[in-house]
Every structure is written in structure tokens, then in C-alpha cells.
Image (cartoon, grey):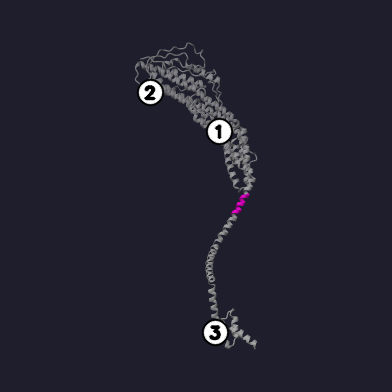
């Protein structure tokens, strides 16, 4: 029964929902009470509650200080707990920053360690790095002192370093500085090519250029010719162009000596390979350059030759040109066949200008001439047989006629300038120029007679001048031309129809007879063009190979120049 009652009590306790775990013993105890005991239980509980209350009051009264301190402590604890909570929250907020700061510190520490290791390595290799960094300065010093081999060795060493360590900034900066120094070296080498250097020096410079590797083979050949041409141009620019004769002599000597050297230097340095490789073939570059130089030479001659006003200077220039072309023929630059046309044009222009000057001077003197009789001039006593065959002295009779004397002097000057350089190809052309001048004199006399009113005595003097022109001046001019060209006298004398107008004027106007001088020009012309040999002024008949002008030639020139007639005597008043 008791077991059953116990089971019922536990079952009832389980059925009370308000009973907590701590109240379960009391609930179990209540279930074991009787009914009377249960009715008394509230009163007992009330008495216990009052007793406990009194005890609590007594304890509170007796320990009030402790309770107050405990309350204060509790309040302080609550405040501190709240502050701690706030601090914990701020700490939680700052923890990520602390984490990142620690990470940065670790990274910076690692970087510092790495730099320290690099500094230690740098310190260990300080001398080697110092040598490397001094390479540009050392190379520049070598270039300035002309030690090109050492400079190129340093350049090759830096290129090797750049190939082995292409990403190192120090090596890249070093290579950049070396490239600048290499450009300076290249400029110096090209400048040396623009100076007066011989073949061994040219070979060394081309070898240096090949080691630098800036130019291809064709570009190097072209650069060589450009530099040598700049050198030749500099020499020509230093010549004085105000003196045409000296300038042409200097230019011809420059081309004769230096052009020959340049061609030989090119052929020795750039020997064409017979294997047919395009790399070793210049494609006619040397030929084109040489033709350019010869063309410029001939163009300068064409421009400058008309400015030469002396036949002797023209002859000397021709000799110099022939000698230059003869020397250049050894390198295939013989241009003697191109010279005749240039010098023929210059000779023709010079002769035409001198003849025009003679005609103009004749016209000026004729226009201002005062027709008064001059004292008679004596004649030489020697006979024709005793005269020198080369004597072309103007007849003394012309001194009585000043205009004709001036004209004959002009013709003699023209012949003296023609004699040192008289091309056979211009024989007929120059004869026509002389005939043209004589025709101009004849026309001028006819025009003077038609436009001027002369008194009887003046008319007689004028007709005497016309007769002297036909019988003395004209044959004398023909004789002078015959001294320059074989058969030249006959060419001039065959054009006698040019003074038909003067002949008619003399035929219709009677005048006093003209005394005949002893040295008859027509008789001398016959003698000259006969069987006796005639010396053509020592001028070679081959225009392309004139005789050299030396001291003997200069002496002969002085002896054979046609004398002129003094015309500055004072004329007596009418």
C-alpha cells in the first residue's frame, strides 16, 4: 500500500505544473500530509513567514552597512560592466586595423630585410659595379683621345651585358649612355672621312664603322663617297672665285690629285666580290658618283671659261684640263673628248668680244675724228726678201689714219689672244667673225660718207682712209689671221666683195694716189701660202692634246705677239 501511495504522490507531483525542480521536495511533502495537517499548513506557513520576516529585519538592521555597501558595489559593478562593454566594442572595431597594421609591418619588415640583403650584396660587389658605371666615361675618354679600338671593345662588352641582363635598369641606363657615346664616335669617324686622309687611315675608319654596325654595306659605300665629296667641296669653297683663272687652276689641280685618290681608295676598300652577292656589289655607285664629279667639273668650266679674257690664260687652263684628264684616265675618267666644245665656245666668245670691241672703238674714234692732214710717216728701207717671214708689223702708213690704226690695234689684240689657243675646228667660224668685223668697218665708212657733209680737203682725207682700209688694213688683217691658221689669209682675201661699196665710192670720187709701202701685204700673203713652210704660232693642230705652256712658250709668245700702232699722238689743229 505504501508503495502504491508513493507512486500516487509522485504522479500527483508530476501533475502540478507550477512545481519547479526546487519546489518538488515541498510538493512531495505536502502530498504526504493528512487532511488536518493540510488545513493547518497555511497557518504554519504564515507563522514561518512572519518569523523569517522578523529575522530578515533583524539581519537588515544589524547589517545595514553591508547591504548599503553591497548596493553601492552592485551599482558600481553595473557601471563598470557597461564601460567594459563599450570598450570591448571599440576594441572589436579596432582589431581589423590592428591586423592590417601588423600585416603592413610584416611586409615593410620583409622589404627592409630584402633591401638590406641587396645593400649587403652591393657592398660586396662595390668595386665591380663602380667599374661598370665608369664604362661610359671611360669610353668617352677613349673617343676623345682617338683610342677607337678600346672604345669599340667597351661598346661590345656593354652590348653583351645588355643581352645577358635585358631587364636590369642599371644595365639599360648604361647601354643608353654608351649609345650616346657611340654616336659621338660615329660623328668623329665621319668627320675624319671629310678630311685629307690617305688609304691606310680610310681602311681603319671603314673597319671601325663596320664594327659599329650602324650602316649596311651599301649605305657605308654611299656614306664614304658623300664624306669624300664633302671634303672636295670644302677645298673648292676655299678657293678665291673672284680670280677666275686661279680658281680654275685650283679646281683642276684638286680634281686631278684628289679625285684620283678617292676612286683608288674606294676600289681598295670596297673590292667587289665576284661571287655575285648583292651585299658586295655597289650597283654602279662609284660610276654614278664619278660621273657626277666630272659633270660638275665640266659645268664649272662652262660657266667660268667665258669670264677669262686672255688667250694665254685660256691655253694654260686647257693644258691643265688635258693633264688632269690624262691622269684620271688611269681610273677610267678620261674626259678629254668633252673639252673641245667648251674651249671652242670660250675661244669663239673671246674672239667675237675682242672683234666687237675693235669695231666699237673704230666707230667711236671715227665719229670724233677731226679730218686734218698728219705729217707723213717714213717707210722702211729694207726689201721684201730681207724681211722675216713671221713679221706681221702693221704698216706705218696707218698712223696717218687714226680710226684705222685703232681698228688694226684691236684686231692685233684679238689675234694675240687667239694665237695661244686656236682650235682648227673654228678656223672658218673665226674667219667669218673677222670678215664680219671688216664688213662692219666697211659699212660704218659708207654710212659715215652718207651722213656727214665733208669739205673738199676733209673728203680727200676720208677717201684716203677708205683706200688705206682696202689696200693696207684689210690685207694686214688677213695676214694676221694667216699667222694663226694655215690658209687663213686666203679665206679672208676671198671675201673682198665686202668692200665693193667702198671700191665704188673710190671709183666715183677722184683723189690723190696713195703711196705704196714697201712691205706689200698681198705679196707676203702669196709668199706665205706658197711652197714655203708656215709656222702656225706653235699651236698644236690637235685640240685635245695642246702643247704644254712653259718658259719657252712664254718667250715665244712675247716674240710673236702682233705689235700695235701708237694712236695717242696729238692731232694738229686744222
Q: Which mark is residue 43?
A: 3
186 or 365, nearer to the observer: 186
**Secondary structure of the residue carrying numbered label 3:** helix
Task: Indicate whether 328 appears above or below 90.
Answer: above
Q: Are marks 1 and 2 in contact (CB under 8 Å)?
A: no
Task: Indicate whether 68 appears above or below 424.
Answer: below
**Secondary structure of the residue carrying numbered label 2:** helix
- Using a 10 Å C-alpha cutoff, classify the residue at mark 3 as few (fewer than 14 neighbours), some (14 to 19) or many (20 or more): few
- How far is mark 3 from mark 1, CA to CA? 144 Å
Callout in the foreground (1, 2) = 1
The image shows residue 353 at horizontal and vertical percentages of 45, 25
Mark found first going from the N terminus, 1 or 2 = 1
Q: Which mark is residue 231?
A: 1
Callout in the foreground (2, 3) = 3
Residue 493 seen:
no
- How far is mark 1 from mark 2, CA to CA? 60 Å
- As for residue 113 lying within the magenta part, the answer is yes
Q: Which residue is identified by label 2? A: 447
For the N terminus, the quadrant is bottom right
Q: Are marks 3 and 1 in contact (CB under 8 Å)?
A: no
Amino acid at each position: 500500500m505504501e508503495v502504491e501511495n508513493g507512486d500516487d504522490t509522485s504522479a500527483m507531483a508530476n501533475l502540478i505544473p507550477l512545481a519547479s525542480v526546487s519546489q518538488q521536495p515541498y510538493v512531495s511533502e505536502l502530498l504526504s500530509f493528512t487532511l488536518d495537517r493540510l488545513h493547518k499548513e497555511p497557518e504554519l506557513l504564515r507563522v514561518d513567514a512572519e518569523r523569517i520576516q522578523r529575522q530578515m529585519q533583524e539581519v537588515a538592521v544589524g547589517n545595514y552597512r553591508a547591504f548599503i555597501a553591497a548596493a553601492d558595489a552592485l551599482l558600481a559593478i553595473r557601471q563598470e560592466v557597461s564601460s567594459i562593454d563599450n570598450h570591448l566594442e571599440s576594441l572589436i572595431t579596432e582589431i581589423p586595423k590592428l591586423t592590417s597594421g601588423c600585416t603592413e609591418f610584416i611586409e615593410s619588415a620583409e622589404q627592409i630585410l630584402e633591401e638590406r640583403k641587396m645593400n649587403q650584396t652591393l657592398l660586396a660587389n662595390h668595386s665591380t659595379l663602380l667599374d661598370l658605371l665608369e664604362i661610359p666615361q671611360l669610353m668617352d675618354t677613349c673617343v676623345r683621345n682617338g683610342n677607337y679600338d678600346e672604345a669599340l671593345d667597351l661598346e661590345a662588352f656593354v652590348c653583351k651585358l645588355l643581352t645577358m641582363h635585358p631587364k636590369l635598369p642599371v644595365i639599360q641606363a648604361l647601354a643608353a649612355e654608351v649609345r650616346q657615346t657611340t654616336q659621338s664616335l660615329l660623328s668623329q669617324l665621319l668627320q675624319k672621312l671629310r678630311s685629307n686622309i690617305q688609304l691606310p687611315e680610310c681602311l681603319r675608319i671603314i673597319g671601325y664603322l663596320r664594327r659599329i654596325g650602324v650602316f649596311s654595306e651599301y649605305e657605308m659605300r654611299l656614306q664614304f663617297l658623300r664624306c669624300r665629296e664633302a671634303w672636295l667641296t670644302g677645298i673648292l669653297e676655299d678657293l678665291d672665285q673672284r680670280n677666275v683663272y686661279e680658281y680654275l687652276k685650283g679646281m683642276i689641280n684638286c680634281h686631278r690629285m684628289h679625285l684620283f685618290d678617292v676612286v683608288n681608295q674606294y676600289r681598295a676598300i670596297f673590292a667587289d666580290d665576284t661571287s655575285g652577292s648583292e651585299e658586295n656589289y655597289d650597283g654602279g655607285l662609284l660610276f654614278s658618283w664619278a660621273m657626277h664629279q666630272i659633270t660638275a667639273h665640266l659645268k664649272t668650266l662652262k660657266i667660268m671659261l667665258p669670264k677669262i679674257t686672255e688667250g694665254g690664260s685660256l691655253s694654260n687652263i686647257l693644258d691643265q684640263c688635258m693633264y688632269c684628264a690624262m691622269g684620271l684616265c688611269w681610273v677610267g675618267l678620261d674626259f678629254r673628248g668633252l673639252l673641245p666644245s667648251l674651249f671652242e665656245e670660250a675661244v669663239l666668245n673671246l674672239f667675237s668680244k675682242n672683234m666687237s670691241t675693235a669695231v666699237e672703238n673704230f666707230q667711236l674714234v671715227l665719229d670724233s675724228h677731226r679730218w686734218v692732214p698728219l705729217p707723213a710717216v717714213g717707210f722702211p728701207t729694207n726689201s721684201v726678201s730681207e724681211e722675216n717671214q713671221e713679221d706681221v708689223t702693221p704698216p706705218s702708213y696707218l698712223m696717218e689714219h687714226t680710226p684705222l690704226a685703232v681698228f688694226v690695234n684691236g684686231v692685233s689684240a684679238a689675234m694675240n689672244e687667239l694665237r695661244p689657243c686656236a682650235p682648227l675646228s673654228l678656223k672658218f667660224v673665226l674667219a667669218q667673225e673677222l670678215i664680219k668685223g671688216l664688213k662692219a668697218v666697211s659699212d660704218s665708212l659708207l654710212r659715215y660718207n652718207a651722213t656727214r657733209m665733208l669739205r673738199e680737203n676733209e673728203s680727200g682725207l676720208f677717201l684716203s682712209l677708205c683706200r688705206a682700209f682696202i689696200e693696207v688694213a684689210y690685207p694686214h688683217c688677213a695676214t694676221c689671221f694667216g699667222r694663226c691658221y694655215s690658209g687663213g689669209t686666203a679665206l679672208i682675201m676671198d671675201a673682198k666683195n665686202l668692200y665693193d661699196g667702198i671700191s665704188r665710192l673710190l671709183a666715183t670720187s677722184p683723189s690723190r694716189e696713195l703711196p705704196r709701202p714697201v712691205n706689200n701685204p698681198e705679196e707676203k700673203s702669196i709668199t706665205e701660202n706658197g711652197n714655203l713652210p708656215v709656222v702656225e704660232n706653235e699651236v698644236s693642230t690637235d685640240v685635245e692634246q695642246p702643247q704644254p705652256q712653259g718658259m719657252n712658250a712664254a718667250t715665244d709668245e712675247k716674240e710673236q705677239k702682233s705689235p700695235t700702232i701708237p694712236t695717242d699722238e696729238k692731232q694738229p689743229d686744222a
